[in-house]
Image (tube, coloured by chain):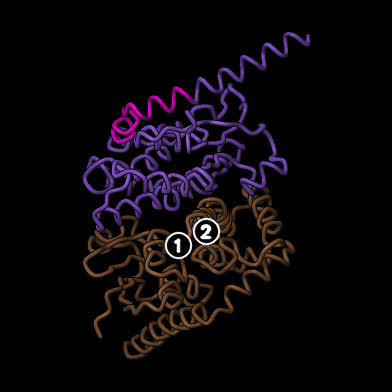
Chain colours: A purple, B brown
Amino acid sequence: MHERITIWTLDWVPMRNGPAGFVRDLRLRWACEEAGLPYAVKTVPFGEGGPVHLARQPFGQVPFMSDGDLQMFESGACALHLAEKSEVLMPRDPQARAETLQWLFAALNSIEMISVPWWFLDVTGAKDNGLTGWLERRLAHMERILSARDWLAAGRFTIADLMMADVLRVAKLRDFGDRPAAEAYVTRVTDRPAFKKAHADQMAHFEAAEAAEAARGQAES
Amino acid sequence: MHERITIWTLDWVPMRNGPAGFVRDLRLRWACEEAGLPYAVKTVPFGEGGPVHLARQPFGQVPFMSDGDLQMFESGACALHLAEKSEVLMPRDPQARAETLQWLFAALNSIEMISVPWWFLDVTGAKDNGLTGWLERRLAHMERILSARDWLAAGRFTIADLMMADVLRVAKLRDFGDRPAAEAYVTRVTDRPAFKKAHADQMAHFEAAEAAEAARGQAES
């Protein structure tokens, strides 16, 4: 069949301590799985984006997406676009929609805005991570919020939970302090069949790429 | 008149080297001015949010907003909600809308996600700002993009430019490297009467608060 939706990701990533299982095409695969939207996955080469890549994603990142003739990038924007196609991800009631939007943006601009730079400083070996206190305060707010409810918006799973759980499931964040409500939340959201399918598909994609790379290396040696 | 839209900000901020002129209620004032939407401004006390504040904004930040009975927080989500009310801010054509969404999210999740933590490390006196190289690369991408066009999406001003210009106009970013296209872009966007009105109104709000504080201090001394 010809899918309207195509998600672009990388053709390969390092498997050892690499981002496999976390590359952000996962967010879009997962949204499509939740909404029952058929999609294809295509790739661009790993490494600094060339002109073709930059024409579709001007920061040289993935994912980017097509939906028929429509093209877009930014995982948050693509996730919102996909969510608009299905009430599973985006409630139609105005207050429920407002809550979903606010928590979608909160995942990206109130948590990830601190957690990803914190993670970056951590993995690049900053001696004294100057973002730790700020991150701790934000995660403490999330722990309080998630102690009082199962889902962020509208009393049920929405695109906001997809995004927040994806932000919070980063291993270093989960090991960072004792936050049982956030931990239970991440487990609750990532136990969904749509997440498991999307995650398994992404891992299979990168494992196949690694196997092909290894075979090529052997043939050349 | 009774405005449907109410924007909440802080009742006071420090004026010397403080955030006056940059508090994010500006984004919502500005969006309302662009769209011709009447709005009221209310305040919560400066400092760590109390229970009333946290009930409306769970991270103790501002702004938050009401639109009739509807309540929401996160400046990005509120800006999108306001943009949906006016074609001035959000084009109706599907590809133009997709572009506007992607650049709205890019402002918050590809630029501000690095620039605000970089700024935070800078002002809190980190000896070696580990985010500098990453920020430089992102700003170099923006310089290339803004060298080739006047507006980010749809060939005209949209909510995406409002957000990106607000992210890029931070003084420390403007002093950081020589980026004439980004500088011309910030000037172009902030020359708009709606920005000037919103900025002047925010400054007047905080200057009045400062004057009231000074008068109270004198009465007590």
By secondary structure, the bulk of the magenta-drawn segment is best described as helix
**Is there a contact, CB below 8 Å, between mark 1 and mark 2?**
yes
Q: Residues within 10 Å of mark 2 (few under 14, many from 20)?
A: some
The x and y percentages for residue A197 are: 40, 25
Residues at marks 1 and 2, common chain? yes
The residue pinned by badge 2 equals B96
Q: Residues within 10 Å of mark 1 (few under 14, many from 20)?
A: few
Q: Amino acid at mark 2?
A: Ala
The x and y percentages for residue A118 are: 52, 44
Left/right placement of residue B109 relative to residue A125 reads left
Residue A187 is one of the magenta-drawn residues: yes
Residue A11 is one of the magenta-drawn residues: no
Residue bounds of the magenta highlight: A184-201
The x and y percentages for residue A70 are: 52, 48
Q: Residue at x 34, y 79 (%)?
A: B38
Q: Residue at x 48, y 38 (%)?
A: A5
Quarter of the N terminus of chain B within the rendering: bottom left
Q: Which mark is residue B92?
A: 1
Q: Nearer the viewer, residue A45 or B16?
A: A45
The subunit letter for the residue under badge 1 reads B
